[in-house]
Every structure is written in structure tokens, then in C-alpha cells.
Amino acid sequence: MSRRLEIAGCALERPLCNHCLGRLFAGVSTGLSNRQRGAIIRYLMGAPMQESGDCHICRGLFSEVSKFGGLVEKSSAPFEHENFLVGSKVDPSVIEREEQLWADSGASETESIKGEMNREVGKVVEAALGKPVEFKNPDIVFVIDTMFDRVTADVTPVFFYGRYRKFSRELPQTRWPCRDCRGKGCPRCNGMGRMYGSSVQDLICPILMRRAEGGEEYFHGMGREDIDALMLGNGRPFVAEVRNPRKRSIDLAAAEDEMNASANGLVVVEGLRPSTRGEMRAIKSAACPKTYRVRVRFQQEFDHRKLNDIPRVLAEKPIRQHTPNRVAHRRADLERVRTVHRVEIETVDGPEVVIVVEADSGTYIKELMHGDGGRTKPNVADIVGVPCEVAELDVISIGDKGV
């Protein structure tokens, strides 16, 4: 107790309001505001009351709490939100004076002026809006610039989970900027700024952004299929992110209907529901096995009996794949080891064979078929002893249970 009285005595050599005095002992007890702590300390020390405008630290800043609360309330009007959090920017000279007081007095149970300001303004806003403060995952963070009486609203993005099936072999998953002009428009891209006129992202995200009245949208898929591959079966999971939304609760059933109607059969979206940043990250990092149906065309006649060797050689064996030639311009040349879990010969029609393959996430299936000039070993072409090409590739299942 005597040490705390020494700290109080040193602090009161300067004119301090009860807020700034009480903050020196913020860690001493609970259930009291810093202003109440300051009043008690002042009483115990026999010190006179101090007007906040003369305070050595805050220069009357706490007399403006109601004003700041009003500014936040006004700033909140355009945005739908269930909860909020308040942050603040304080004149650096105020912070410097406070930290100097801590050093001079030896106080160690302190709270920063920004911490108290955020809390006191938060109380005012909570009462005005009838909505709670949320510390972990607020819908919106209001940052008060106390020097210039300005408030900025940092709106948390909204996330929406769904699954899509893709029925076009000319549709990429995400927007593909033109390599020559990088989005500006040039002869190669016919002025579009992109290599393809549309994408799965274009058929999904703008509808959500418009309904949420957002500013930007992003598409996060659980992996991706090649442009010329169909995405069938149970569909590919995705999370669409809309940043700076004015609306957070939208009619997702109506949004899904709009997507499917406007896509004209190119894409079908199912299971649209609210999601979270955590689920988005889990989907992006997931490494789930996938099942493919591959139509392979052999370039010469071959002994069909050799097809029986394909499951025996490939199934549950390590497959070594160097980065394919087709993507070497944008990816490092690495060797990856993957496992093919299941191989079935589905149909045989002369030189064309349909093979169903279940493999680890990240397996290059086309290269598993033709070998990519020896960069994938073993491969179907080597097993059969005849060169081949992939005529069609479809993703027919994604094993994402539990993700």
C-alpha cells in the first residue's frame, strides 16, 4: 500500500484528472472505473479536485466522450451489424506524456489512455445502438481520430460457403488477367483485360457483392480444376468473400437461384450459406483426395491386356511428378510425391479408354496419363507401352468430409 501511495504522490505533482490518475492503478481492482479509482486515490491523498481541461495528460479529452460516441453512432448508420468494437487514435504527445508519467512514478499496474477511451466510448455507443461490444469477431470496428474528430468504419468481410459444379470446358475458375496487358486491355485479349470472358467467380461473386452492397469480392476454392475439365459429382467447395459490405444478412436462397438462372447451365451452385474466415482458410489449405474420370486416347494400337497392369502399378504406390511443362512458366520446378489410391478401367472403345482415378490432392492427372516427357513416373503411357493423350478430364468427386 505504501508503494502505491508513493506512486500517487509522485503522480499528483502534476495536475491530473481522475481518469488519468485512476489509470495508474487500473490493475489494482475490478468493478471500478478509472474515474472512480482516481477519485478514491485523490481522497486518500487529500488532494484537491482537478478540472479535466487542465489535466497534464489528456488536456480534457475525456470530456469529449459523449461527442465521440455521437460521431460513431452517425458513422454506423449505413452498415448492418449485430455488434461492434471501438478503437482510437490519440495525439502522440498525449501518449508520450502518459508514458513519461509511468516512468517517473514507477507505476506498473497501468492502462493506456487508448484502452480507456475505447471502453468509455464503447459504453456510450452500446447504449445508443442497443448492440453489444464484441472483442473477438466484431462485425465492424469504429476507429476514432480524437485529434480531428473523425471516425472511420472498418467493416469485417462477409463470407458465404457453397459448392459448384461446372459443365463447360471453356470456363476458368477465377478471373484470368491477360498476360500481355495485365488487365488494361490489348489486341491479344480483345480489349477485355482478361484471357477469358467469364469464369466461375464471375457467375457467383458479383451477385453476392451486389446483394451485400459490398466494395470488393474474392473467390476461394478448395483447389481448382483445369479450364477444360468439368467439375461434376458432389461439386467443389468454395467460400466467396465480400469486403466492406453494407448488408450482412442477405437472402441466400434467392441469390443461389439468381446464380443458377444467370449461368445458363454453365455452372450450378448448391448449399449456399453463411461462412467464416476460419472456414475460408480451412478450405484453401485442405488437401482432400479427388476422383477423376479421364478419357485417354492411345496413338497406336496396343495389347489391351496391358490395361490390367495399370491398377497394379499405380494403386497405392508413390508417384513422382516434376512440375509439368504446361505450368513451368509460373511454378517452381519441384518434384512432388503423390499417391494414387484407386484406379479402375471403366470402358474400352478401340484406342480410347476411360479410366477412373482417385488420387491425393495436387496430383497432376493429365501427366499421370501421358508422362509429360518422363517428368511423371510411373505413368499410363509407359505401362501400356504406347503414347497417349488426354481427350477429356472430369472431376467426379471431392473427398472433403470433415473439412
Image (cartoon, helix red, strand yellow):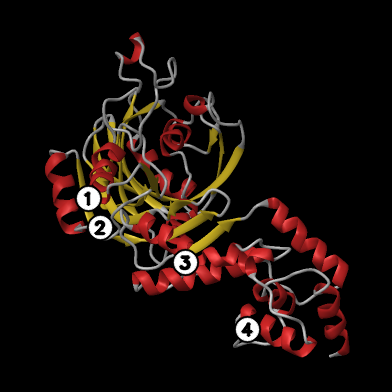
Label 2 vs label 4, nearer the camera: 4
Circle 2 is placed at which residue position?
272
Query: Earlier along the polypeptide chain: callout 4 or callout 1?
Result: 4
Label 4 vs label 1, nearer the camera: 4
Q: Are marks 2 and 1 in contact (CB under 8 Å)?
A: yes
Whether 58 is drawn above or below 105: the answer is above
Q: Tag 4, which secondary structure?
A: helix
User: Would you identify the image quadrant in which residue 119 lies?
Assistant: bottom right
Q: Amino acid at mark 1?
A: Val
Query: Earlier along the polypeptide chain: callout 1 or callout 3?
Result: 3
- Dot 1, how many residues are within 10 Å of its Cα: few (below 14), some (14-19), or many (20+)? many
For this rendering, which residue is in front, 191 or 247?
247
Circle 4 is placed at which residue position?
36
Q: Amino acid at mark 2?
A: Leu
For this rendering, which residue is in front, 306 or 122?
122
Whether 393 is drawn above or below 48: the answer is above
Q: CA distance from mark 4 to mark 1?
A: 57 Å
Label 1 vs label 3, nearer the camera: 3
Q: CA distance from mark 4 to mark 3?
A: 18 Å
At 14% from the left edge and 40% from the top edge, which residue is drawn?
262
Whether 29 is drawn above or below 320: the answer is below
Q: Tag 1, which secondary structure?
A: strand
Q: Are marks 2 and 4 in contact (CB under 8 Å)?
A: no
For this rendering, which residue is in front, 359 or 25?
25
Whether 84 is drawn above or below 23: the answer is above
Question: What mark, if any, has residue 269 been given in the picture?
Answer: 1
Left or right, residue 293 beside residue 223: left
Circle 3 is placed at which residue position?
66
At 48% from the left edge and 45% from the top edge, which residue is drawn?
362
